[in-house]
Amino acid sequence: MRTLIVFSFLFVSVTLFDQKRNAGYQLAIKRASSAIVIDGVLNEPAWLESATASDFFMVLPMDTSKAQVKTDVKLTYDEDNLYLIAICYHALPGPYIVESLRRDFAFGKNDNFLLFMDTFDDQTNGFSFGANAAGAQWDGLMYEGSKVDLNWDNQWTSVVKNYDDKWIFEAAIPFKTIRFKEGMNTWGINFSRLDLKTTEKSSWTPVPRQFPTASLAFSGTLVWDTPPKKAGANISVIPYLLGGITQNRENINQTTHRAEAGVDVKVAVTSSLNLDLTVNPDFSQVDVDRQVTNLDRFELFFPERRQFFLENGDMFNNFGYTTIRPFFSRRIGLAAPIQAGARLSGKLDKNWRIAAMNMQTGKVEEENIPAQNFSVVALQRKVFARSNVGLLMINKESLNYAVPDNFTGTIYSKFNRNMGLEYNLASANNKWLGKALLLKSFTPQKQSDDFVYSGHLQYAGRKFQISNQYEFVGNGYTAEVGYVPRNNYVRINPQISYLFFPKGKHVLSHGPKLATSIFFTPDYKQTDSETYLAYNINFRNLSTLVLWVANDYVKLLRPFDPTNFNLDSLAAGTEHRWQAVGGEFSSKPQSRFTYSLSARYGGYFAEGTRAFFSSELGYRFQPYVSFVLSSSYNDIRLPQPWGRHTFWLVGPRLDVTFTNKIFFTTFLQYNEQRNNINLNTRFQWRYRPASDLFVVYTDNYLPNTLMAKNHALVLKFTYWWNI
């Protein structure tokens, strides 16, 4: 298997030197001849004199013709800002379709226009800005060639104005907000439009339908009349003030008060390299995690949402694979407060990226958690057209740590270090993707097999998609600042899928997918396997249907409670086999009432059965109110001593968006498995770009008696000050 992957990497290397496919699609940008007012009105002389990007290409439902929905885009700039105006014409009568005015909206549920900007023209990293037809903003960092991290948030302004035959999006993006290489006269750029009334997704440059319009491999070229210069002194100071009160009623009726202050500082060392500093950071306004019923034998993963860790965070957090992450930033500050931190990240030139971070957490006396220091350094070198080689080094150090005599709690290691090297393959035509990964850990006690090697290769054609992945994680490999829920295994994961494109009016595409995941011990004795056969149907109205069957085998390597409910455990070494069937359906997003359904029925551990059903029901009173009710139900039937157990998980969410600057969100979660009801409400007023007032209230209750476990109320004020 390893030999096959290496051979395949060499085989596809012939495609790595190709030029960017859409480099010939060029849009000239020249300095504005007049002032630009961000009002959604196309009347300034500078706009009338600017070149226009038009004649978009259809991506969906078909990618073989020009778009039927007309879109025109213009760009200009001055000393401080890049300006964009997009004229989005209607093709069918009727109102636009949006969920709400909530920032960073769901792409597929809103009429929207998006800008994808590759400021280094490396087809890998960039920025995305946009809006839906009601004016809700979208901004994110682009990484790995086509992915957008919407947790990123920065300063820029925009307005959307609606007319009878069109809607216009106008925006000013400060040069201080984005990173770019000074002196470059060409950037990669593309524009995307989704019109749900016609179900048409379009792009300024042609993009094959199997790829997202965000794929920077298919971006065009923005040609500057004069290369943009660094926008003078670029230092931002972002202080916060916080007041709060917490009541803990589980053991004793204890009330604590909070009065805190902290500051973040952003310093543009160059136009492409940024220094971030933080002192006593607070993240109380961050969205709560969506809970799940946990029936897994291994730790679950929840994504990073804290702003400080996001810019260029892909160099740290995306190193490796989804279940082999040597670095996971949520490990920092999980059990102890962050005192201070610094991070330097960005581009050194067109080929080199760097990211270095140092974080210091405090000591927690009552739990004997030592003060700890976390240091991470990542270096990345672009090779060929779009591929890169990356190096990662991680050090976690416990400072002045001593274990008390007769201590029975958690004992922390004095240090844990990791070093990794990976090669990310991305062909110029985006059809071949792959990775080769090598990791090694270092601990105070020498471990055998303390390394990882892994690789995968994927081909994404118009009809065929084929991939295979190989993983080896040694028994001694330890990543205390990472997310590696399982070690001491070998895994292979081949997948293949095919799509048919019928000519009928209702079905856009359909086809089968076959995937197998097999785990072995390092001496290749099988311990787990899942074979999954699905049939996917994509309808022209954008609804989807998936039907599947699966066959599972598990040999337990350690005792496991199949309910994860603190009951008896199945013995290590026992073997379990079962089959299951299921399906998923998502309704068309054009309706005010939308829904998705998922169901599964089949065997389970110990010759038991498991029935599962989940749903997400949504209704919108556009553009101001969106209500979503998420729920899931598990019915597990096992022999004694477990018997029958049912687990409900219910999570209604209400979003009220008074304007695109004032938001109110209420999120309730009832988790029967954890015997908890959690209420989180958040009011946010964005009184100026990237400056906010937050009011956050959180409750936890016992479901049976509704007795309160704890309450928390936080008032937080942030201000973004540019020096």
Image: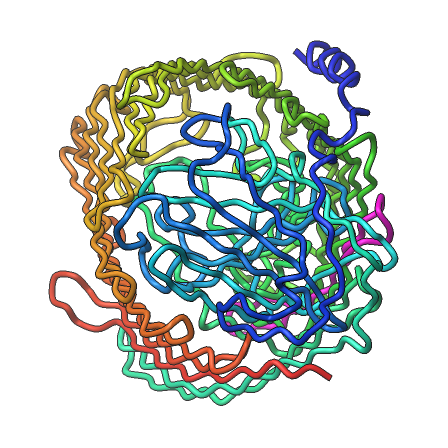
Is 54 rendered above or below residue 602?
below
* Left/right of residue 355 with respect to residue 161 in the rendered view: right
Is 275 rendered above or below residue 526?
below
**Where is residue 696 shown, x and y percent of the image?**
37, 76
Instruction: Find the residue positioned furthest to the left.
Output: 705
- The residue lying toward the viewer, choosing from 333 and 148, is 148
**Residue under the image location 75 percent in, 60 percent down:** 30
Look at the image and tell me in which quarter the C terminus lies.
bottom right
What range is drawn magenta here?
Answer: 346-370
**Where is residue 131 shown, x and y percent of the image?**
47, 58
- The residue lying toward the viewer, choosing from 613 and 558, is 613
Residue 143 makes an appearance in the image: yes
Where is residue 669, by image quadrant? bottom left
* Left/right of residue 131 with respect to residue 672 in the rendered view: right
**Residue under the image location 25 percent in, 62 percent down:** 668
Residue 480 makes an appearance in the image: no
**Residue under the image location 43 percent in, 41 percent down:** 69
**Where is residue 633 shown, x and y percent of the image?**
19, 41
- The residue lying toward the viewer, choosing from 519 and 514, is 514
Look at the image and tell me in which quarter the N terminus lies.
top right
Is 534 rendered above or below residue 475?
above
* Left/right of residue 281 with respect to residue 399 in the rendered view: left
**Where is residue 288 shown, x and y percent of the image?**
39, 62
Where is residue 579, by image quadrant? top left
* Left/right of residue 12 with respect to residue 530 in the rendered view: right
Report if residue 351 lies within the magenta region: yes
What coloring was used for the rendering?
rainbow
Image label count: 0
Is 548 rendered above or below residue 284?
above
**Residue under the image location 31 percent in, 52 percent down:** 97
Report if residue 568 lies within the magenta region: no
